[in-house]
Amino acid sequence: MKKILVTGGAGYIGSHTVVDLIEAGYEVVVADNFHNSRPAALEGVRAITGKTVRHYDVDLADRDATLAMFAEHDFAGAIHFAAYKLVGESVDKPLEYYRNNLNSLLNVIEGLQLQGNSNLVFSSSCSVYGNADELPVTEDTPRKTAESPYAMTKQLGEDIISDYCKTRPDFKAILLRYFNPAGAHESGLIGEDPSNPPSNLVPVITGVAAGNLAFDKMTVFGTDYPTRDGSNVRDYIHVQDLARAHTLALEYVMGEKMKSNIDLFNLGIGDGLTVLEVIEAFEKVNGVKLNYELGARRAGDVVAVYADRTKATEVLGWEPQRGVDEIMRTAWAWETKANKAG
Ligand code: WQD
């Protein structure tokens, strides 16, 4: 059985990907220091799959601790999720974002190479496109100025991997540019469960509606954008569809079909929704009225971004199965679950 390292495997996308990997027959080891996740996620993975994963509570920005973990295993591949990920927070805390996100990646690359193996799937982001001139964005759309330190750490992460691949033909990597992950596992046993109060749209919607947050009204950050209703456009992708894409990408990078030792894919459903349309879908699917107001723009936001996902479908055979209604149904079920940690 091939053994896979999943860094950030107790996180939102990470935990859903661990489930998909186990169900695909892989042995999984998780490295996660619970900076923005909880041990309950790994309990949820066990409840869904019946498997208890080996877990390291390691700070991946700590080189010695990270290399010590790699020394104990021979991973067939690694999926690197572990990073600070909030656009708004990164504007306020740039040094923490650069130090954590870049040092963690450097240590994971070194660990993979020290053990002689070299198949890496890297969690990148549509935010590398900045305010793209063309929509939908394809993998050939030029990256523009990063609109936040978070986006810059993803651009730099891609460049670090690309430069390293040039020097090491035996090092293979796939860069996955996510659009906006949302929703929760159909079992209701895992979902978005950040250690800190959420700032992403969907958990803010469900948190406000459920009365689980410190504020009882959500703010739409800007309705004066050049979009069909003035609010920002994003490509919302169900987290289970996103998880499936990671298993397919891992099999591609471990396989023999890559044309070179690096490739990249957009992971979005290929459709854009405005913030107001997302709110409308939430209210319609769940029969719940959301308390919200129209407010000022948020620093770091791009106007609109959504994917052309042709390449992931044609090369990886990836077909997203779920739309915004399933996102809202599963997100609400997760938020309102009686025994949700938090
Ligand atoms: C979405 C839209 C906000 C909260 C995310 C992740 C980032 C990366 C890219 C993967 C924006 C609006 C939000 C609120 C609002 N993902 N909004 N009121 O900024 O697109 O970035 O996707 O790598 O990790 O953070 O996502 O959910 O914060 O915002 O109006 O209370 O919702 O302005 O237009 P964003 P988001």
Image (tube, rainbow, N blue to C red):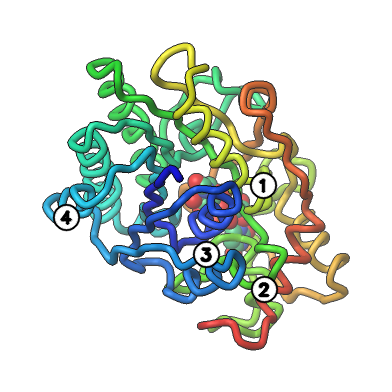
Image x and y of residue 229, in percent: 78, 47
Q: Amino acid at mark 4?
A: Asp
Q: Secondary structure at mark 3?
A: loop
| Tag of residue 30 | none
Q: Is residue 296 visible?
A: no
Answer above or below: position of 341 versus 240. below
Answer above or below: position of 89 versus 167. below
Q: Amino acid at mark 2?
A: Trp
Q: Amino acid at mark 1?
A: Asp
Which badge, 1 or 3, comes first in the chain's sequence? 3
Comparing 309 with 144, the one in front is 309
The residue that disc 3 covers is: 199
Image x and y of residue 284, in percent: 88, 66
- Please name the residue shown 68% across and 29% down the image: 317
Q: Is mark 3 within 8 Å of ligand 1?
A: yes
- Please name the residue shown 16% across and 53% down the image: 68
The residue that disc 2 covers is: 334
Q: CA distance from mark 1 to mark 4?
A: 32 Å
Image x and y of residue 190, in percent: 59, 68
Which badge, 4 or 2, comes first in the chain's sequence? 4
The residue that disc 1 covers is: 241
Q: CA distance from mark 2 to mark 1?
A: 17 Å
- Report whether 95 appears left or right of 141: left
